[in-house]
Image (spheres, rainbow, N blue to C red):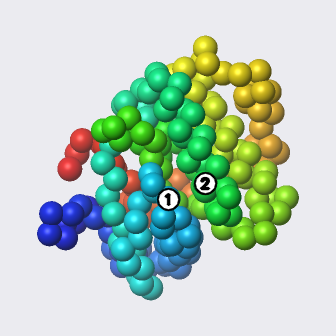
Amino acid sequence: MEFSGDRQLVVRDVRSGRRWLRWIARQLMSREACALGILKDVRGVPDLISHGRDTLCRSWLEGQPMQVARPRDAGYFKAAARLLRQLHRLGVAHNDLAKEPNWLVTPEGNPALVDFQLAMHAPRRGHLFRMLAREDLRHLLKHKRTYCASRLTAREKVILANPASISRLWMLTGKPVYLFVTRRLLGWADREGAGDR
């Protein structure tokens, strides 16, 4: 994290990582920059400040990660579903919403999202996009089941019970590699609300 005047910023710099992994880091940064650029007017998403070949700078969002805030208000989850619909209408699927730290609870009690490195932009919103968008929603509903289970609707329970095949494949193959590269090799983590700053 860095400061610009009194504004807190999050800066990713691939030059701090291993040289042989920089191409992967650049790809992840490009995905994040693309998503944040498209979502520039969406409240609850960081602002993209700048993006170059080796760096990405975005705004800091104040809030606590979901696993700390433990939102019990059904209104939070209703607002979170609205936020997801905004992303999806703009052709962006987050693709990493199973992780509670990617969901923030702002000081006002509103939802916010961080960590768009795996985001997908699909202007035509084809079959793959729709499947990934549904998985975004299913992951939100998993969190609702954890913190506000009594407010799940019958339709939401059906969605929860039916993960997409692409989700099962990702968890077995891609996700462990992604976590190893970003967390262990590159040392990247979005730390909003982590209390270690």
**Residue under numbered circle 2:** 86
- Which residue appears at 38% of the width and 78% of the height? 50
Answer above or below: position of 65 versus 51. Answer: above
From this viewpoint, which residue is outermost toward the bottom? Answer: 53
Work out which residue is located at the far top of the displayed protein and give it: 150
Residue at image coords 15%, 63%: 6
Check whether the beta carbons of the residues at disc 2 and disc 1 lie within 8 A of each other: yes
The residue positioned 65% from the left and 63% from the top of the image is 90
Locate residue 53 relative to residue 11 in the image: left or right: right
Quadrant including the N terminus: bottom left
Which residue position is annotated with label 1?
42
Identified at 28% across, 64% down, the residue is 9
Residues at marks 2 and 1, CA–CA distance in whole angstroms = 7 Å
Residue 177 is labelled as none
Residue 8 shown left or right of residue 36 in the figure = left
Return the residue nearer the eye: 49 or 53.
49
Which type of secondary structure does the marked residue at label 1 adopt? loop
Residue furthest to the right in view is 127
Residue 16: x %, y % from top left: 33, 73
Question: Hey, what amino acid is under mark 2?
Answer: Gln
**Is residue 98 something that shows in the picture?**
no
> How would you rate the neighbour count of disc 1 (Cα within 10 Å): few for under 14, some for 14-19, many for 20 or more?
some
In the image, is residue 40 above or below residue 55?
above
Q: Is residue 86 left or right of residue 168?
A: left
Q: Position of residue 134 (x, y in %)?
A: 74, 45
Q: Is residue 21 found left or right of 193 in the rendered image?
A: right
Residue 93, how many percent across, how many down?
65, 57
Give the mark nearest the N terminus, 2 or 1. 1
Q: How many labels sit on residues?
A: 2
Residue 176 placement (x, y as % from top left): 60, 50
